Image: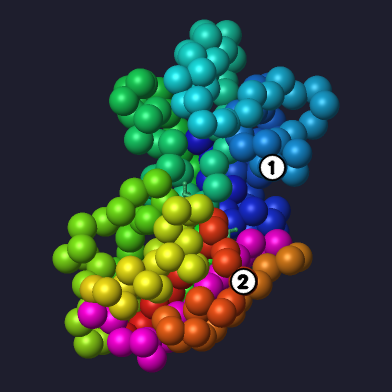
């Protein structure tokens, strides 16, 4: 498994780039395959149907090594979970990548050792994990349901002040990257971002 970081090839580790280059078979999101696969490499897209991805890997690995490309880091809310349920650890080599969360904190020049990192991508953390306490800093993965429009309203219900600072970091590392810093209250007036990183500071 190779983490490809937030997306721009400039942020892929050389070890991951080498594994991807030398792979006979590449599995990855459609965007990753477009960006990284060559015509002479067999490919399989990662879609919502994880079972079919696992079936493909199971079949292919009998004859060759398969490189699975995932965004960010493979171990952070990614496909490593599913692969570990399917294959023993000894059958998997993980090449880390820069997580989109890590990248967002770097873009904001913010230390992240005290941040509470949570995923709202396809899940909702318990309210207690999201609740406000002075000094709390959140780093959130988001999706279409929990987006830059819906998360601020939810946080304000959980005690966060309207004036809390929020940075909405979208398409990180790509040419069309945007980072909007505003307040929870004013986030409603900003263009909605779905698959982004939100950093919230109380
Ligand atoms: C399934 S999670 C994968 C997280 C990934 N393993 C990581 O370490 O970044 C997908 C979510 O990651 C975030 N994400 C991934 N790439 C991003 C990017 N380039 N810019 C902003 N957010 C990104 C979004 O919140 C997206 O919904």
Q: How is the image coloured?
A: rainbow
Mark found first going from the N terminus, 2 or 1: 1
Residue 113 placement, left or right of 41: left
- Extent of the magenta region: 159-174
Name the element at disc 2.
loop
Residue 131 placement, left or right of 140: left
Q: Is residue 4 above or below residue 162?
A: above
Kindly give the residue lying farthest to the right in the view shown: 39
Q: Residues within 10 Å of mark 1 (few under 14, many from 20)?
A: few
Label 1 CB-ligand 1 distance < 8 A: no
Camera-side residue: 9 or 118? 118
Percent position (x, y) of residue 5? 57, 54
Residue occupied by mark 1? 31
Residue 191: which disc? 2
Camera-side residue: 108 or 156? 156
Q: Is residue 25 above or below residue 123?
A: above
The stretch drawn in magenta includes residue 186: no
Percent position (x, y) of residue 9? 70, 53
Percent position (x, y) of residue 127? 20, 63
Residue sitting at x 48%, y 62%:
147
Q: Is residue 44 above or below residue 6?
A: above
Residue 164 placement, left or right of 178: left
Can residue 74 be seen in the rendering of this structure? yes
Percent position (x, y) of residue 166? 45, 80
């Amino acid at each position: 498994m190779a983490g490809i970081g937030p997306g721009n090839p400039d942020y892929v580790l050389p070890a991951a780039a080498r594994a991807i280059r030398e792979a006979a078979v590449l599995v990855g999101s459609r965007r990753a395959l477009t960006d990284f696969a060559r015509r002479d490499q067999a490919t399989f897209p990662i879609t919502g149907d994880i079972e079919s991805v696992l079936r493909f890997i199971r079949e292919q690995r009998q004859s060759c090594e398969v490189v699975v490309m995932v965004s960010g880091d493979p171990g952070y809310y990614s496909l490593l979970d599913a692969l570990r349920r399917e294959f023993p650890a000894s059958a998997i080599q993980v090449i880390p990548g820069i997580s989109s969360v890590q990248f967002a904190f770097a873009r904001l020049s913010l230390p992240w050792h005290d941040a509470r990192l949570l995923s709202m991508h396809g899940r909702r953390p318990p309210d207690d994990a999201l609740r406000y306490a002075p000094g709390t800093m959140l780093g959130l993965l988001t999706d279409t349901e929990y987006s830059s429009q819906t998360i601020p309203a939810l946080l304000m219900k959980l005690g966060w002040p309207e004036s809390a600072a929020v940075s909405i970091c979208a398409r990180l590392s790509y040419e069309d990257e945007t980072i909007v810093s505003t307040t929870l209250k004013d986030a409603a007036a900003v263009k909605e971002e779905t698959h982004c990183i939100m950093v919230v500071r109380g």
